[in-house]
Image: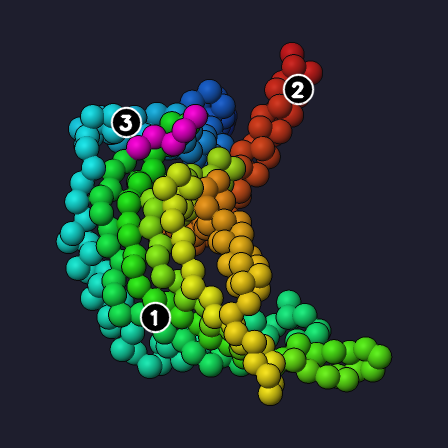
Amino acid sequence: MSDLWSTSKEFIKGFIAGQIILICFMFFLIKFFLFQNPSKNVSTKRRRKIFEVTKTHSPQNQALNILSKIRYDPNSTGAETCEWLNVLIAQAIAKYRNDSGFLNRIIRVLDEEINGSKKPNFLSPITITEFSLGEDFPMLKSSCIRFVENSINLRAEIRFEFHDQITLGIETQVLVNWPKIMMAALPVALSVTLTKFSGTISIEFINSKDSPASFISISILEEDLNLEFDCKSMLGNRTKVKDLPKLTQLIINRLRKSFFELIVFPNSKKFNVPSFWPDAEENFLELNLEQEDELENLIDENLENKKLL
């Protein structure tokens, strides 16, 4: 009886041990062939999502895709009126003209700019004596969407006219520093007025190729640009000389040159488009680094598998 019990006991132990070994073997077999490292699986999904988003927003097809969906043909659609927008712009300008705080901030910014590090040493501190934003309002005549030359990008072209008097007046002194510092000073008073400004504004939405950042580019087209100034000057202390033609022409030419360098196409002012997720660019770069690390890990694993085989 004892021999039978001992035999049964050994059989039960062997059976249980065999089942445990079989379960472990099946577990490792299933894990090796059916399952994958969770980090690799997640990274693969991330990589697939990034590829799909990039493909959907490909700049080569984006403009044509938008035009086809909204049924807009830049070649056949005529210019549209902007009368409703003129009303809104006029209301906004009227509000700012009547806001003394806004005007004082503009004067403060101008004062800091003209008396900054770029001011020549032979000029005394410059004082703003007159500043006016005028009384009339700009008029947007028409607008349309057109393709950018030699590009598939779209831009809005808005024709405008502005007849008014935006004035800035300043006073300063030209210092004579030879043969000694501040030997003499020549008083100078200038007043520059923008009397006419018309042309075409170009607004273009641009996507960056190297990052998810986007920006809006604003420029003035040169073809129909009309920019007119009126400049008044007065030199001297006791004997005053008014409106020297050469000085007036020099100032106007300098203003036009600065304006062209600042915003006349192909030059432009660019404004970043705010993102709903400020860390989007950081995540974009981080995912790229993760993908590079994962690719290196896959290469190392393949090399190890080849060695084992």
Say which residue appears at 41% left-offset and 66% top-offset: 193
Q: Mark 1 falls on what kind of element?
A: loop
Labelled pair 1, 3 in contact (Cβ < 8 Å): no
The residue positioned 46% from the left and 46% from the top of the image is 264
Instruction: Give the CA distance from mark 3 to mark 2.
Output: 44 Å
Name the residue type under label 3.
Asn
At label 2, counting other C-alpha atoms closer than 10 Å, the crowd grade (few under 14, some 14-19, many 20 or more) is few
Where residue 32 appears, x then y in whole percent?
49, 23
Q: Residues within 10 Å of mark 1 (few under 14, many from 20)?
A: some
Pick the residue in front: 309 or 133. Answer: 133
Front in this rendered view, residue 272 or 281? 272
| Among the 4 quarters of the image, the one containing residue 12 | top left
Question: Which of the two discs, 3 and 2, labels the residue nearer the N terminus?
Answer: 3
For the magenta stretch, what is the residue range? Answer: 146-150
Task: State the residue in front, 111 or 2.
Answer: 111
Give the amino acid at mark 1.
Answer: Leu
Amino acid type of the residue tagged 2 in the rendering? Leu
Q: Is residue 121 left or right of residue 180?
A: left
Residue 8 against residue 199 in the figure, above or below: above
Residue 19 % position (x, y): 44, 25
Q: Which mark is residue 133?
A: 1
Instruction: Answer whether residue 161 is visible to the viewer in this image.
Output: yes
